[in-house]
Image (cartoon, rainbow, N blue to C red):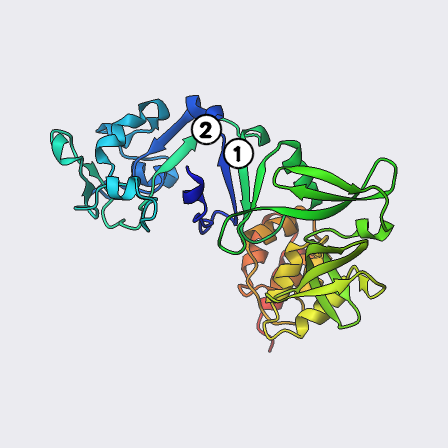
Amino acid sequence: LSEKLLANFLPSSGYGEDIFTLKLDHLRDRLTLTLPTGSSLNRNVMKAGEVMADWSNGNAHEASQWDDLYLPWSHRRLIVPFLDKTYFFHQEQKDSTFPFHREHIHEHIDPHSSMQGMNSIKRPKNKNKYDFVEFQAWGPISSNDLESFTFTKNRPNRNTLKLLAQHQISTFDGTSGTRKFYQTTLFDRGSDGKCHQMKFVIDRIISVAEDVEPNWCDFDVGNVIFDSSVGEIAEIIEFEIDGRTAALRVQALGSKNLRKVTLNGHIQKPTLQQVITFANLDSDKVRIRNIAAGKGFVSSPQALIDLYSNIGSTNFSDATIEWFFNQKPTLEQVIALANIESDKFRIRDIAAPNFASSPKALVKLYSDLIPKR
């Protein structure tokens, strides 16, 4: 893929906010692709004109023609007759990521007019939105296989930057909608115990100063701070250096506005209670809490309960509930979280097999749901 095409890449909905490109030279022998019907799953279970196969139980349609199969990279020339020069060779075209003939695009993709002896590639019935080709890399992918990394929302912290530099992975900032080479300042303690100022530039780290203010190493991109001077909880976005003076560019939780904060006695790590107080000031009582939960402020079952208490009912994600039970909560904590969840039976029903070990425990688990007379 060319840099011009990559510059317009956006994160895919449901697949995260970061974009990785892989080293083709490392993967050629184990790379395959499925033709433009969306994902490989769609190709196997939603062939044109057929009912969706019950793929959740391991069923799929049998392959009946060459384009039903995973196509090895070594055989990629088979798709050449179906490429459209307008969309494939001219990347200024808006739809250049789908470089195929479009005359009957909603039903099938035709080969070039000079090769009418070839069959058309059928598309899944009523699935016109799947206008992409999927590639598959078989086997493990390691850091050594990464060509580049682009973040579109959260900037990498110092540990991530050190890992990117270790493997010399080109790093791009995509937060503005345009893909640009990334460089930033970071601080880290060396083996001598001193705080070192460094600069990350594209794919490497350069030393700038070996002995700076020790407290600068207490802060990192992505950390959440409490600014007591304004009563605000914010996330560190980046450092701003002016000579030997360091400041922080921060963004209040739930806000998109950046502001500059100097490193002084007003800056500290917030407590869970301060997060709750700040969240209660927001019109959406759940929004700030969700952000805080993702920033590491929930370290125990009780912390999760405390964070979401007293705001009415809320819907917890499956991942949050799974994490909660993995922390081995008490029966009382299960009941407390179940009373916060909108579906009062959901958490109780999950807990019942392990927590209702006696008639008394079963009654206690569900007693809050018994109508009071």
Residue 52 seen anywhere in this rendered image of the structure: no
Mark 1 and mark 2 in contact? Answer it, CB < 8 Å.
yes
Q: Is residue 249 above or below residue 65?
A: below
The x, y position of residue 166, in whole percent, is: 66, 32
Q: Three-letter amino acid code at disc 1?
A: Glu
Residue 6 seen anywhere in this rendered image of the structure: yes
**Which quadrant of the figure has residue 292?**
bottom right
**Which quadrant of the figure has residue 110?**
top left
Q: Residues within 10 Å of mark 1 (few under 14, many from 20)?
A: some
Quarter of the image with the N terminus is top left
Query: On the image, numbered disc 2 is attached to which residue?
Result: 24
Q: On the rendered structure, is 318 left or right of 220? A: left
Query: On the image, numbered disc 1 is attached to which residue?
Result: 147
In the image, 337 versus 196, the foreground residue is 196
Please report the residue visible at 85 percent of the width from the left and 48 percent of the height from the top: 212
Q: Is residue 187 above or below residue 69?
A: below
Q: Secondary structure at mark 2?
A: helix
Q: On the rendered structure, is 261 left or right of 339? A: right
The x, y position of residue 95, in whole percent, is: 31, 49
In the image, 86 versus 230, the foreground residue is 86
Name the residue at the bottom extreme.
Answer: 373
The x, y position of residue 112, in whole percent, is: 17, 35
Please report the residue visible at 58 percent of the width from the left and 42 percent of the height from the top: 171
The residues bearing labels 1 and 2 have C-alpha atoms spaced at a distance of 9 Å
In the image, 125 versus 193, the foreground residue is 193
Q: Three-letter amino acid code at disc 2?
A: Leu
Q: Secondary structure at mark 1?
A: strand
Q: Residues within 10 Å of mark 2 (few under 14, many from 20)?
A: some
Chain-order first, disc 1 or disc 2:
2
